Amino acid sequence: MDKILVRGGRPLSGSISISGAKNATLPALAASLLTTGHVHLSNIPHLKDVTTMVELLGQHGSAITIDDKLGVEIDNTNITSFRAPYDLVRTMRASILVMGPLLARYGQTEISLPGGCAIGSRPVNLHIQGLRAMGAEIELGGGYIRARAKRLKGTRFTFDPVTVTGTENLLMAATLAKGQTILENAAREPEVIDLARCLIRMGAKIHGVGTSTLVIDGVDHLQGCHHAIIPDRIETATFMIAAVLTRGDVLLTNTCAEDLRNPIDKLIQMGATIDELEGNCIRIRCHGDINAIDLETSPYPGFPTDIQAQMLVLNSLAKGTGIVTETVFENRFMHVSELQRMGADILIRGNTAIVRGSTRLIGAPVMATDLRASASLVLAGLAAEGETLISRVYHIDRGYERIEEKLRALDADIQRVSG
Ligand code: UD1
């Protein structure tokens, strides 16, 4: 199994291009099931999770053409299976995103229950409750969700708590429902907005995009479309943090600062200099001290939980003590014990991490536990003295396109090793 070897201590410098957003690509691929028209998606990242979603669509009967430069073209004229099997769903929870589209368009679906994962129990009760409110008959049994509906009907549904894929599933389902659906306390993440834009291109009638109330007037048919996926804000933030912790100077192109207001403000407070340049570029540099900062994760526009692990590393190297509170997921500090093995001084109290800064991180063999946790280990390796060998890097390949190549382009000493 591949590992990543990092020799730390080099300031990052240079320029890289940010990939398309994984979390916008997955729902857009699932949305293609709503139409038999051809759906063409560009700016698609090359990631394991994207391959898994393509595989899932393939086994439903989608014909998919992939072109490295042009993107993905999906033809769903011959959907023959409505089942998402356990083997695929267990490798990627976002497989649940095919539930809404399959039910809305074909009136039936059978999806393996995703179950727990490394960052908590992660229920899908709101996806189910919402579809039931739209008239679906849903049974759970044998580890599967079996759903049927003649035609979904519009409803008013309030999410509690806010859920990203829950909002996306119901939004997609509502586009083909009979009548009006109002989704309240809907997620406002840029990826939800991107999905809504993609659906509008397909002919969906959606109002309130970008707000927490989405109003969807169901239509009888959707058509094919071309849609370019937004840049990945989590990848952008991860490289920004890498630049700051190595005291580097990095230019990120093909990105979007607007989607990162909260993290950018935090990095500036910590001592980074950030220039938002024309043409969707961000230049980030840091040469002096970094100051520790308190932060609390929350749904957009709050601080993203997907950047929490990376910020723990930065706080470990900063002056002072930073208190990081995780409010979105129940068990998202799995990376802390690995960071402690590298010398980080982090105390966990419930959903809070107290990070004492000014640590000298020392390279060590460490193990990735989930996607964003593994990114934090790479960052720690870049700042550490000596060698860090990260195993189980398949987690990182789920969500970061060629991370070691991109970091090498920024002058990092990093390589993938096998065995
Ligand atoms: C998505 C992102 C993930 C990100 C997360 C939070 C994708 C593919 N993944 O995951 O990267 O970390 O948003 O920004 O876009 N919940 C319920 N019932 C439900 C659904 C969720 O109680 O039916 C709870 C969850 O347990 C969690 C909270 O809601 O505590 C938020 O989870 P959610 O937004 O659904 O996360 P995902 O959509 O799975």
Image (cartoon, rainbow, N blue to C red):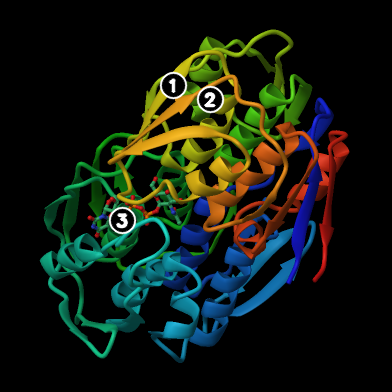
Residue 189 occupies which quadrant of the picture?
Answer: top left
Label 3 environment density (alpha carbons within 10 Å; few <14, some 14–19, many ≥20): many
Label 1 environment density (alpha carbons within 10 Å; few <14, some 14–19, many ≥20): many
* Cβ–Cβ under 8 Å for marks 2 and 1: yes
As drawn, the label of residue 322 is: 1
Residue 272 occupies which quadrant of the picture?
Answer: top right
Residue 174 is situated, as x and y percent measured from the top left of the image, at 26, 60
| Of pointers 3 and 1, the one earlier in the residue sequence | 3
Q: In the depicted view, which residue is nearer to us: 85 or 410? A: 410
Disc 2 residue lies near ligand 1 with CB under 8 A: no
**Residue in the image at 34% along x and 67% along y:** 116
User: Is any part of residue 326 visible from this angle?
Assistant: no
**Residue in the image at 29% along x and 37% along y:** 208
Secondary structure, mark 2, is helix
| Of pointers 2 and 1, the one earlier in the residue sequence | 2
Estimate the spatial distance between the alpha carbons at disc 2 and disc 3, rounded to whole Å: 37 Å
Residue 303 is situated, as x and y percent measured from the top left of the image, at 41, 30
Amino acid identity at mark 2? Asn
Residue denoted by label 3: 171
Amino acid identity at mark 3? Leu
Residue denoted by label 2: 315
- In this rendering, is residue 122 above or below 382? below
Disc 1 residue lies near ligand 1 with CB under 8 A: no
Residue 61 is situated, as x and y percent measured from the top left of the image, at 53, 86
- In this rendering, is residue 47 above or below 54? above
Asked whether, in this view, residue 164 is left or right of residue 269, the answer is left
